């Protein structure tokens, strides 16, 4: 069976270093993926199979330490070895790298033989761990050697665990996988059922916290508390679970994540029932009721002041900063967060939380698939404006709202981001003027969106009614002159119906996936040929994949669409 070629993600903002690493690694038979900063590296991880990451420390947008921390905090990527590039005597950088979770370091100036030896060692160690886990399944008679070899290949290609690969192949069910894992970790494997849960114990915890950690409190004694957990290999999760009851020794038992979630959903439903609230109150536990007292008129000016201050704070947010509006019994706080560091900016009375929340809800638009809602704020006196994402969490006696600013598009910065961008926009403008309907593919969706918006700017589309529409799976960047909407829970067909007599001057529509048959209602309307000035975007990751999908249906061609594939800084016609 053919072996999978290891793929290495090299991240550095200096082209000469990236080219050096690429040439050296290609010569040794590795595949190379390149990124110029930490943010781009994280996007590449989502799109590509990666076996090892080489990260420079000093980069714009997101440095190597933060990128390493993000990788190690994500369940999907934390098993990927990370090598950090440091100075020859940069001991402080090495310490920070160790804290971020890096497996190894490369010093400047580079020694090619040393780099290759370290990469070879880390990749070998990674494959040995996967092989050992698979051998346990063989020893117990669950699979054979041929199935293991196939699973190892699938795990490498899809960047998943060997157990997940065996499950996806149908070689093992989840009970077998978790039973073997529990034996390997010397834990008890539980086949959970609701009757096993201490109902008086579970109401002591936030259901949302238990969902986040994928765990369940089972029972407690004078000195111990027992939890069912789905992933005991995640040290961050284990640490958080132990902090839920720091005064007691925590004992962990393994259980299927689906069964944990099913029981949590069952109890979440019970928490919404009035009789349970009465039971909690009878035990003299605190339950907050929304204030019903009407605020006196003299308080209105004070409320306006609070709201004005909050708008000022949010419009002054720096890149990478988030704010939490956090309610506790009898008080609330506005908390600034950057990375893992947080500080209290303002403190308010509890009633202010509900008043501010109401103001925010009045300005929120549709939510995306992650449950985040969009928000637009404007300060008329100064002309400042900004777009934000909001996430709400409502708990038994505590609530919180997370507010994160969406980056605003800058035409000047985008046109200067790469020397080929102006020429690419010019080519796109020519094609759009000629065909009026474009069907696009490409993995760099943020780049594609910015190109399309730049096309609008170059065409000098009037800002009068109706506006240009950008309907996106996720709003990643704020376009000031466009009407942006989340495609999640959005009826495109109804929107187009409203503008039959007054055509939309420009429509960018991002399909949910690259499978052209899964978005049939909206696609049939767009590909009917009845509408002009449309760009239809699919997240195709390769030119071959796009050609294959387009060959299934021909209505796009009959409707006059020109099909293009976006490679970085060039267009390929289909």
Image (cartoon, helix red, strand yellow):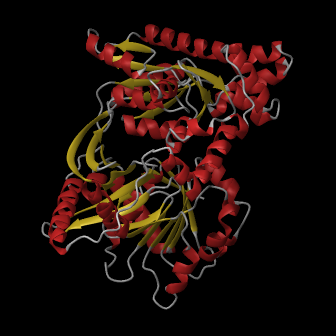
Q: Is residue 321 left or right of residue 569?
A: left
Query: Is 218 or 97 nearer to us in this picture?
Result: 218
Which corner quadrant of the image does residue 390 belong to? bottom left
Q: Is residue 568 left or right of residue 226?
A: left
Indicate the position of residue 371 as horizontal and vertical percent values: 49, 55
Query: Is 312 or 504 nearer to us in this picture?
Result: 312
Which corner quadrant of the image does residue 187 belong to? top right
Query: Is 424 or 100 nearer to us in this picture?
Result: 100
Which corner quadrant of the image does residue 247 belong to? top left
Indicate the position of residue 456 as horizontal and vertical percent values: 36, 69
Q: Residue at x 45, y 12 (%)?
A: 115
Q: Residue at x 74, y 18 (%)?
A: 134
Q: Relative to 447, does residue 339 appear above or below in the rendering?
A: above
Q: Could one spot residue 454 in this view of the protein?
A: no
Mark count:
0
Q: Quadrant of the C terminus?
A: bottom right
């Amino acid at each position: 069976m053919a072996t999978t070629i290891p793929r290495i993600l090299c991240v550095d903002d200096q082209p000469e270093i990236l080219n050096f690493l690429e040439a050296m690694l290609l010569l040794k038979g590795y595949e190379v993926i390149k990124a110029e900063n930490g943010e781009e590296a994280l996007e590449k991880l989502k799109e590509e199979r990666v076996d090892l990451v080489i990260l420079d420390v000093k980069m714009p947008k997101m440095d190597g330490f933060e990128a390493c921390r993000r990788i190690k905090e994500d369940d999907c990527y934390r098993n990927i070895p990370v090598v950090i590039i440091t100075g020859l005597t940069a001991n402080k950088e090495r310490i920070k790298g160790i804290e971020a979770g890096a497996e190894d370091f490369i010093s400047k100036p580079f020694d090619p033989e040393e780099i290759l030896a370290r990469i070879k060692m880390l990749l070998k160690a990674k494959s040995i761990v996967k092989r050992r886990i698979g051998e346990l399944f063989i020893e117990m008679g669950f699979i054979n050697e041929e199935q293991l070899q196939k699973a190892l290949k699938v795990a490498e290609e899809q960047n998943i665990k060997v157990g997940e690969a065996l499950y996806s192949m149908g070689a093992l069910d989840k009970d077998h996988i978790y039973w073997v894992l529990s034996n390997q970790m010397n834990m008890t494997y539980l086949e959970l059922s609701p009757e096993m849960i201490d109902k008086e114990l579970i109401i002591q915890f936030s259901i949302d916290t238990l969902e986040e950690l994928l765990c369940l409190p089972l029972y407690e004694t004078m000195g111990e508390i027992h939890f069912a957990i789905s992933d005991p290999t995640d040290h961050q999760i284990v640490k958080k679970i132990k902090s839920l009851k720091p005064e007691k020794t925590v004992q962990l038992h393994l259980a299927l994540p689906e069964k944990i979630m099913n029981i949590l959903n069952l109890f979440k439903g019970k928490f919404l029932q009035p009789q349970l609230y009465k039971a909690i109150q009878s035990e003299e536990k605190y339950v907050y009721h929304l204030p019903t007292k009407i605020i006196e008129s003299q308080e209105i000016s004070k409320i306006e002041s609070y709201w004005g201050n909050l708008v000022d704070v949010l419009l002054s947010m720096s890149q990478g900063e988030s704010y939490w509006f956090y309610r506790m019994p009898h008080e609330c706080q506005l908390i600034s967060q950057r990375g893992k560091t947080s500080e209290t900016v303002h403190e308010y009375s509890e009633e202010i939380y509900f008043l501010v929340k109401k103001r925010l809800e009045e300005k929120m638009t549709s939510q995306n698939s992650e449950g985040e809602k969009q928000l637009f704020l404007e300060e008329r006196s100064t002309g400042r404006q900004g777009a934000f994402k909001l996430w709400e969490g409502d708990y038994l006696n505590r609530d919180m709202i997370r507010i994160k600013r969406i980056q605003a598009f800058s035409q000047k910065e985008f046109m200067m981001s790469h020397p080929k961008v102006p020429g690419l926009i010019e080519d796109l403008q020519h094609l759009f003027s000629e065909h009026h309907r474009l069907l696009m593919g490409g993995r760099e969706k943020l780049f594609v969106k910015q190109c399309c918006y730049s096309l609008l700017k170059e065409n000098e589309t009037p800002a009068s009614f109706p506006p240009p529409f950008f309907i996106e799976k996720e709003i990643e960047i704020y376009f000031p002159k466009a009407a942006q909407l989340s495609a999640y829970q959005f009826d495109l067909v109804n929107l187009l119906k409203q503008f039959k007599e007054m055509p939309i001057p420009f429509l960018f529509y991002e399909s949910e996936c690259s499978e052209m048959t899964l978005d049939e209602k909206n696609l049939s309307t767009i590909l009917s040929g009845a509408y002009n000035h449309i760009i239809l975007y699919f997240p195709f990751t390769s030119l071959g994949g796009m050609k294959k999908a387009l060959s299934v249906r021909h209505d796009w061609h009959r409707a006059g669409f020109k099909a293009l594939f976006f490679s970085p800084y060039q267009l390929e016609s289909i």
